[in-house]
Amino acid sequence: MAANSRFAVAVHALTLLALEADERHSSRDIASSVATNPVVIRRLLAELSRAGLVESAHGAKGGFRLAKPAASISLLDVRSAVEDCGSMFAQREKRNEKCPVACRMAGILNDVFARVESKVAPELKKTTLADIVRQIG
Amino acid sequence: MAANSRFAVAVHALTLLALEADERHSSRDIASSVATNPVVIRRLLAELSRAGLVESAHGAKGGFRLAKPAASISLLDVRSAVEDCGSMFAQREKRNEKCPVACRMAGILNDVFARVESKVAPELKKTTLADIVRQIG
DNA sequence: CATAATGTAACCATTATAGTCACATATGGC
DNA sequence: GCCATATGTGACTATAATGGTTACATTATG
């Protein structure tokens, strides 16, 4: 599989929108900056739209723009919108029910994953699109 | 793709080894607890062996055992052995070199990823196989 | 020598991501 | 009304990772 770059592309696209928050941007222009296909952008931004981060308009002069201020969109919001969960955070579906170790592993790993997430989430929440715009501008 | 459970399986297998650290365990027995195929276990434990976490022996009475004390094997060691990196931590390979935003995104996302990793790594380092054995025993 | 194990190659199935084409739908300006 | 320009989405393909399975060479024990 090509490495999962959905989060990276989402942040990239949102940054473009945040830089000119008053204008609408077409999937074609965004795709040009990201170097991908407009359909890929439309599909990803459809998820961001469902999450309430962007807003779109059909037709001529249509396109995408942020649905709220850049300062109120954190990278945690972005990750939540485009990722089910981190790749590490996966348990096996099957297990040997007769094995006491197997039966306790799920709970133990859940605790581990929860502790990790409790560190990751606040870190992602700290940074907003406005911060990223500031780094570029 | 089936969800990536390599880390979960590795921790599971190492926990079994840690519970009876003096004995050798066959891939068949470990696979039975994890509910997978012995070859899957041998392949995963080959990576842990290359990382110096386990040791193996061929032939009758052969099998796997920890290469060092359970208290000196952290979950960070395990993750390093079996995962290239988190799925979130991926940049796109291509970009539009003419776009100033595209050109700066890689650096900005690298910083984000580094900050997240600086929170995740210490958290994983905190927990050792000995801690997990304690939770089970 | 028989048995029991790892190491690994060679497949296959499943799934996620990404890319592409096509087209229905909606909008704005002439 | 018409045309150009958008999004939304279905359908299909390619690529790659994970996981499962069989097979077999190798190695160690007794």
Image (cartoon, coloured by chain):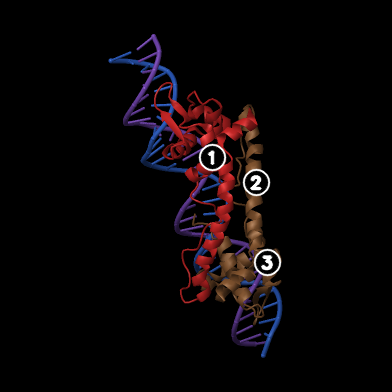
Chain colours: A red, B brown, C purple, D blue
Which of C12 and D1 lies nearest the eye of the viewer?
D1
Amino acid at the residue labelled 3: Ile
Image-based side of A80 in relation to B77, left or right: left
What x and y, as percent, mark residue A18?
54, 29
> Vertical placement of A72 versus B66: above or below?
above
Circles 2 and 3: CB distance less than 8 Å? no
Residue at 61% x, 32% y is B102
Local packing at callout 1 (Cα closer than 10 Å; few below 14, some 14-19, many 20+) is many
- State the residue position of label 2: B115
Q: Answer yes or no: is residue A114 visible.
A: yes
Amino acid at the residue labelled 2: Arg
Q: Chain of mark 1?
A: A
Q: CA distance from mark 2 to mark 3?
A: 24 Å
Q: Nearer the viewer, mark 2 or mark 3?
A: 2
What x and y, as percent, mark residue B4?
53, 57
Q: Which mark is residue B73?
A: 3
Q: Which mark is residue A74?
A: 1
- Marked residue nearer the N-terminal end (2 or 3): 3
> Vertical placement of A73 versus B137: above or below?
above
What x and y, as percent, mark residue B36?
51, 68
